Image (tube, rainbow, N blue to C red):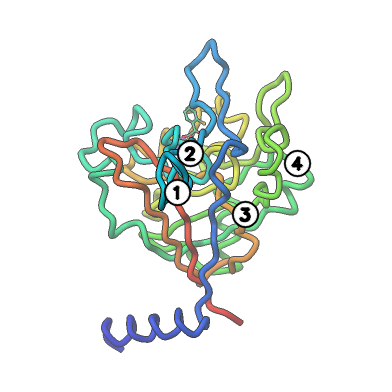
């Protein structure tokens, strides 16, 4: 079938509900958990603020609208290559210069939610990804890879979501060899349901924050605080993850949408 016919079929399937659109974003607002780096190490993103301009009142008689105070890396969001020092030189590494053709792609959903329930510091390794591929099929070039941890179920409670104690944050993520393996498969990007693309303890890895360091080194993308991955199949869905076209932006909140075949 040619592309025109296939796209026409997709339109029909979206209209009929034969393809379901799953919302993979969390709510963005003052309750949204925000990354808290040690203040002696770095400055932090402020909490999201939503300020009313008017709501059918003396400040605007017919209309409601708000203005926002919003960090680029807030809530369900996109990391562009320029976010990390290793990706600093890519001309197409900003939210307004990246290639939008890359943003819509098949998504591989690696479910390790059971392991994470037992161990919040769970690390996904290259060996584990290869075992997943044996079971579900190979990860292809240009595809998204996301770790299903069901960490989004904690998003209503910032303390549980950040899960920090005196030894630092505790949340799952990839090992350096995992990211190196995925990059060897020429993926477009890696996504997590936690506050960032890296594990809570990733500051102590070599290199520190390997997902950030290596993904952006290779001009690839990151996705954080993804929601509802428990509604996606391991393979067969298409993920749309498009950042706002912020001028020289390093990231952006996204409305992450997955197209999933029903039944
Ligand atoms: C800056 C430094 C460390 C991290 C992050 C940002 C993120 O998670 C992010 O939102 O990109 S871990
Ligand atoms: Mn980020």
Asked if the residue at tag 1 contacts the one at tag 3, i.e. Cβ–Cβ closer than 8 Å, the answer is no
Whole-Å distance between the Cαs marked 3 and 2?
36 Å
Q: Mark 2, residues whose alpha carbon is within 10 Å: few (<14), some, or many (≥20)?
A: few
* Among the two numbered marks 3 and 1 on one chain, the one whose residue lies closer to the N terminus: 1
Name the residue that disc number 2 marks.
52
212 lies above or below 55: above
* Among the two numbered marks 3 and 2 on one chain, the one whose residue lies closer to the N terminus: 2
Residue extending furthest top?
Answer: 40
Please give left or right for residue 113 compared with residue 46 in the image. right
138 lies above or below 185: below
* Among the two numbered marks 2 and 4 on one chain, the one whose residue lies closer to the N terminus: 2
Give the x, y percent position of residue 184. Answer: 39, 50
Whole-Å distance between the Cαs marked 2 and 4?
42 Å
Eye-nearest disc, 3 or 1: 1
In terms of image quadrants, where is residue 262? bottom right
Q: Mark 3, residues whose alpha carbon is within 10 Å: few (<14), some, or many (≥20)?
A: many
On the question of residue 137 being in view, the answer is yes
Please give left or right for residue 121 compared with residue 257 in the image. right
Q: Mark 1, residues whose alpha carbon is within 10 Å: few (<14), some, or many (≥20)?
A: few
Name the residue that disc number 3 marks.
148
On the question of residue 211 being in view, the answer is no
Eye-nearest disc, 2 or 4: 2
Which disc is residue 64 wearing?
A: 1
Whole-Å distance between the Cαs marked 1 and 4?
45 Å
48 or 78, which is in the foreground?
48
* Among the two numbered marks 1 and 4 on one chain, the one whose residue lies closer to the N terminus: 1
Figure quadrant of the N terminus: bottom left
């Amino acid at each position: 079938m040619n592309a025109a016919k296939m796209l026409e079929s997709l339109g029909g399937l979206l209209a009929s509900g034969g393809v379901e659109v799953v919302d993979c974003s969390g709510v963005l607002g003052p309750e949204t958990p925000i990354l808290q780096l040690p203040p002696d190490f770095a400055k932090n993103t402020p909490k999201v603020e939503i300020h009313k301009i008017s709501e059918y009142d003396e400040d605007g008689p017919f209309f409601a609208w708000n203005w926002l105070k919003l960090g680029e890396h807030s809530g369900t969001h996109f990391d562009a290559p320029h976010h990390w020092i290793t990706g600093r030189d890519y001309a197409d590494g900003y939210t307004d210069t990246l290639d939008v053709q890359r943003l819509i792609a098949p998504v591989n959903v690696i479910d390790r939610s059971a392991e994470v329930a037992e161990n919040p510091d769970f690390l996904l390794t290259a060996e584990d990804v290869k075992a997943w591929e044996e079971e579900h099929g190979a990860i292809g070039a240009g595809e998204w890879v996301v770790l299903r941890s069901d960490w989004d179920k904690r998003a209503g409670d910032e303390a549980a979501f950040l899960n920090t104690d005196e030894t630092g944050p505790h949340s799952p993520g990839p090992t350096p060899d995992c990211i190196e393996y995925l990059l060897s498969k020429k993926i477009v990007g890696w996504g997590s349901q936690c506050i960032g693309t890296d594990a809570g303890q990733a500051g102590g890895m070599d290199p520190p924050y390997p997902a950030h360091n290596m993904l952006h080194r290779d001009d690839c993308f990151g996705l954080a605080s993804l929601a509802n991955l428990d509604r996606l199949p391991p393979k067969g869905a298409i993920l749309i993850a498009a950042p706002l076209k912020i001028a020289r932006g390093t990231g952006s909140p996204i409305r992450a949408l997955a197209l999933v075949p029903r039944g």
